[in-house]
Image (spheres, helix red, strand yellow):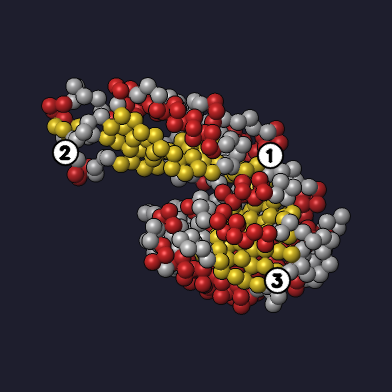
Amino acid sequence: MTLSQLSVPQVDASVDALWDAALPVLFDYIAIPAKSPAYAPNWAAEGHLADAVELIRSWCVENAPADANVVVHEIQGRTPLITIEVPAFGDPTSQDTVMLYGHLDKQPEMTGWRDGLGPWTPVLEGDRLYGRGGGDDGYSAFAIIGALNALRDAGGSHCRCVGLIEASEESGSVDLPAHLEQLGDFLGDISLVVCLDSCAADYDALWATTSLRGGVGIELRVDVLDRGMHSGLTSGAAPTSMRVLRQLLDRIEDPVTGRILLDGLHAEIPEGRIAEAHAAAATGVDVRNDIAYSGTTEAPHGSAADMLLATTWEPTLCYVGIDGVPSLAEAGNVLRPFTTLGLSFRLPPTVDCGEAAKLLIEVLSADPPSNATVTVTATKGGNGWNAPVTEPWLAEALTAASMSHFGRPAGGMGIGGGIPFMSMLGERYPDAQFLITGVLGPESNAHGPNEFLHLPTARKVTACAAHVIDAHARR
């Protein structure tokens, strides 16, 4: 087994040159309000996703290796998919394929941006490029091309590579399966997946994501009246929808600790992941340090390792939306007829989201308090992912790449979010190795206000990807 033999100075020079030239294009990308279809139902007519696709496509055509083939795939009613096919180069040891993955669709605007910043206003302050989508993860197409160019410039080798840049990831990758079916055998025999849509615990090392949580969305509606009625004349003689909701929610969540009460939503945490959390905590990682607690809100008690496991391997519930409740300015003295809550459950990586949804519907629908009308609907869901055992060549390549470009060994940990495509790939290619990494480190605040891309990390991740792809070709 031979690890990457690329010259670090040559890789750095190639990556720096590419990123210096790409930065103005990334500014243009951030300025496009290319919201994912779940948040922009009229995305096709609005044209913003098409603008982002064309921007990325044209840049890739101009900057990819000369033998690359860049294609935009269209399916009626579906968001587009960009593929970047690059034939093998140098002297690879196999005919395998490397898949490189990212996305260009974005989360909605969100309020709370500080003065001078905004979701569609690219602003460079020091090492931070502010604006929606730069780190999550519009930078990925640039990093894919940059890694392959740097590898070739430094005299390395790579197997056949296929880049996928999709446009529905923030909506759960709803359009990706249709594209994959249409592509048929195009993807080939994938033995390495490099996904650039993940997080970093800090900006001082290459971080590999080892697990992702799954998720289930539930709409829970309680109806108690046919219409709103005077609260003075009806309260006491009719139940309230909120009181019924509270009783239902207490079936599934401890109201004091937040612990999910349904055993079927929990999973045993593998010993290796527990050890990994303790190792990450030993480097100073504590997820509580990156949470903007309001006022005197107290962080949960427990060790840093406990908190890391709580956010990556425990089920949780967040209340993400509500209907049937007027604003305070419009609220009269009325006993409201119904309330609907949007519930977002995060699931351990090994819990099946379909089974979780069935259990939640069963528990919430049974024996309604006050015999109210309770409607429970599963709105969306996706399975999590737990990385296969890392092969020695990849473990050594990650460490060597991180030492070369960050000056510290690579780290590994799970994250609490999800990347739907990874569970699809894990099922389809059970023998593949995975490098799931990214640039979303402390304070980067993806999906929220003041999101930014940490540019030095983007450059270093690009360089590390070049080394790993080269090591894969020589394994």
Dot 1 or dot 2: first in sequence order is: 1
Residue 438 locus on image (x, y percent): 61, 55
Amino acid type of the residue that numbered disc 1 sits on in the rendered structure:
Glu
Image point (33%, 38%), residue name: 340
Amino acid type of the residue that numbered disc 2 sits on in the rendered structure:
Gly
Task: Mark yes or no: residue 4 visible.
Answer: no
Tell me: residue 409, above or below residue 31: above
Would you say 401 lies left or right of 143 here? Answer: right
Residue 246 locus on image (x, y percent): 35, 27
Disc ID at residue 149: 3
Disc ID at residue 332: 2
Q: CA distance from mark 1 to mark 2?
A: 53 Å
Q: Are marks 1 and 2 in contact (CB under 8 Å)?
A: no
Q: Residues within 10 Å of mark 1 (few under 14, many from 20)?
A: many
Disc ID at residue 210: none
Disc ID at residue 276: 1
